[in-house]
């Protein structure tokens, strides 16, 4: 029997809403996400069943509805609320960050222009990790394209029309030929296969960690997987768990935007960017998000 869950989340007084909407509007073909000025619709799997998450936003609240093409468990209402709170960064310590650095001679300008900026988080840590691997060393446009092809290749669709981002078992079932047809390199196929196997084996319990991530343990386990390095780990922790202290000095866009912010005539290397970000720990990844949003 189809079922519906709902919850309402109070939003922070300051929320940089356009940044959130842009994150979910990445794929303009709207295969698995559909975004208007104030409403996000997203296809996902809920306990393996096709579902559609709808979040309607106003100045003070996010009203979320999850339509599932099957029955749900009584505990799922709290699970939904936790997911929406993560996705919209409700509990991210942005106020403390801004209070600490709004007078900084360079970063302070960005904080003033982008007050209330929070980091959009993916619906699940697994989705964030797959996106991080997908985006390694290619443009955002290329990553969006092959992500779309992957979702269409798996082909799970909610009754409302949106395709659902696959879970580990769905990706494990894809053949190498299907992965290559979607545009994934041999190295990325290997990494995703290793990740999905560890998720299915319980060695990488991403959903269990979602609300209280053991950061050091996650870093150690991901670092042991072939093809996953510091950028992928920090990006996964940011987009999957809302952890704000990963150092994204390996990100090309972060380095380019920092060069612009500092007015440097020469490009910044990873070491220079890492040293500059270090001043802002434990909010280095949040600083990176401000640079992306420039």
Image (tube, rainbow, N blue to C red):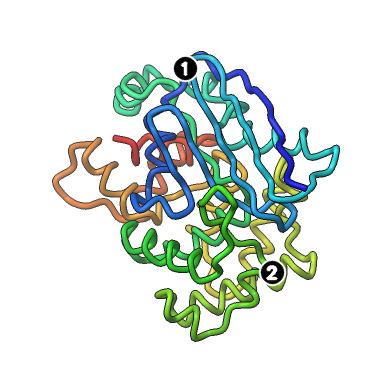
Task: Describe residue 163's horizontal placement relative to residue 50 as left or right.
Answer: left
Viewer-proximal residue among 198 and 255: 198
Q: Mark 2 packing: few (<14 Cα in 10 Å), some, or many (20+)?
A: few
Tell me which residue sits at (46%, 41%) in the image. 278
Which image quarter is the C terminus in?
Answer: top left
The x and y percentages for residue 115 are: 40, 20
The x and y percentages for residue 4 are: 71, 37
Against 38, residue 273 (above or below) is: below
Task: Describe residue 270's horizontal placement relative to residue 98 as left or right.
Answer: left
> In the rendered image, which quarter is residue 5 located in?
top right
Viewer-proximal residue among 35 and 71: 71
Check disc 2 and report the residue beneath it. Answer: 169
Tell me which residue sits at (55%, 32%) in the image. 55
Q: Mark 1 packing: few (<14 Cα in 10 Å), some, or many (20+)?
A: some
Of marks 2 and 1, which one's residue comes earlier in the chain? 1
Check disc 1 and report the residue beneath it. Answer: 14
Secondary element type, mark 2: helix
Secondary element type, mark 1: loop
Tell me which residue sits at (56%, 49%) in the image. 43
Viewer-proximal residue among 131 and 94: 131
Against 104, residue 165 (above or below) is: below
Viewer-proximal residue among 15 and 61: 61
- Work out how far the residue at label 2 is from the one at label 1, CA to CA, in angstroms: 39 Å
Are dots 2 and 1 in contact, CB under 8 Å? no
């Amino acid at each position: 029997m189809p079922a519906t869950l709902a919850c309402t989340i109070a939003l922070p007084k300051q929320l940089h809403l356009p940044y959130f909407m842009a994150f979910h509007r990445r794929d303009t073909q709207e295969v698995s996400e559909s975004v208007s000025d104030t409403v996000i619709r997203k296809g996902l799997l809920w306990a393996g069943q096709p579902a559609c998450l709808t979040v309607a936003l106003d100045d003070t609240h996010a009203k979320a509805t999850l339509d599932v093409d099957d029955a749900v468990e009584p505990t799922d209402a709290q699970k939904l609320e936790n997911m929406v709170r993560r996705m919209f960064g409700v509990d991210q310590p942005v106020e403390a960050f801004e209070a600490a650095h709004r007078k900084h001679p360079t970063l302070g300008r960005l904080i003033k222009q982008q007050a209330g900026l929070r980091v959009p988080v993916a619906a699940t840590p697994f989705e964030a990790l797959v996106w991080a691997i997908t985006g390694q060393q290619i443009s955002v446009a290329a990553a969006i394209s092959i992500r779309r092809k992957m979702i269409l290749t798996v082909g799970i669709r909610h009754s409302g029309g949106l395709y659902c981002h696959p879970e580990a078992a769905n990706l494990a079932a894809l053949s190498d030929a299907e992965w290559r047809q979607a545009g994934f390199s041999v190295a990325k196929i290997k990494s995703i296969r290793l990740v999905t196997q560890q998720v299915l084996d319980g060695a990488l319990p991403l959903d269990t960690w979602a609300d209280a991530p053991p950061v050091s343990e996650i870093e150690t386990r991901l670092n042991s997987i072939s093809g996953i390095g510091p950028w992928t780990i920090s990006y996964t922790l940011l987009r999957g768990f809302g952890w704000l202290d990963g150092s994204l000095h390996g990100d090309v866009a972060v380095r380019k935007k920092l060069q612009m912010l500092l007015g440097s005539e020469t490009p910044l290397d990873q070491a220079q960017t890492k040293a500059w970000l270090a001043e802002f720990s434990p909010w280095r990844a949040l600083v990176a998000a401000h640079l992306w949003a420039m």
